Amino acid sequence: MLEILFFARLREQLGVGRLQVPYSDAVATLAGLQDHLIAEHGELWAQALQAENVLRAVNQDMAALDSALAAGDEVAFFPPVTGG
């Protein structure tokens, strides 16, 4: 299983903070997982997850779409964070 987390604005847009996706070859990369989520959930998810400023992390390390995933990984999607 992959543990998927959504934070801040993305959690509000998608109406979910956490979900699990069975690991398979189709979700062996971050891009594959994102494509799977969009195919399963539709246009709203496409707009949210493909937004230019969306950040992604695998096991709490920033990750690019070509990053490999493994069973048991935690994947997070979140907007940029600002502080002051």
Image (cartoon, rainbow, N blue to C red):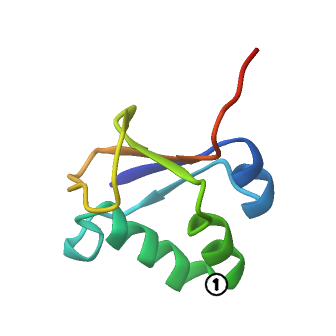
Quick one: 56 or 84, which is closer to the camera?
84
**The N terminus, quarter of image:** bottom left
Q: Secondary structure at mark 1?
A: loop
Q: Does residue 58 sit above or below 53 in this rendering?
A: above
Category of crowding for the residue at label 1, using alpha-carbon neighbours closer than 10 angstroms: few (below 14), some (14–19), many (at least 20)? few
Q: Amino acid at mark 1?
A: Gly
- On screen, residue 55 versus residue 13, left or right, reads left
The residue at the point 76 percent across, 14 percent down is 84
The residue at the point 20 percent across, 56 percent down is 68
- On screen, residue 46 versus residue 73, left or right, reads right
The residue at the point 35 percent across, 68 percent down is 31
Residue 78 rendering spot, x and y as whole percentages: 60, 45
Residue 77 rendering spot, x and y as whole percentages: 54, 50
Quick one: 26 or 80, which is closer to the camera?
80
The residue at the point 72 percent across, 20 percent down is 83
Quick one: 22 or 83, which is closer to the camera?
83
Quadrant location of residue 53? bottom right
Q: Does residue 4 sit above or below 83 in this rendering?
A: below
Q: How many marks?
A: 1
Residue 29 rendering spot, x and y as whole percentages: 26, 63
Residue 23 rendering spot, x and y as whole percentages: 28, 63
Q: What residue is disc 1 on?
A: 42
- On screen, residue 60 versus residue 13, left or right, reads left
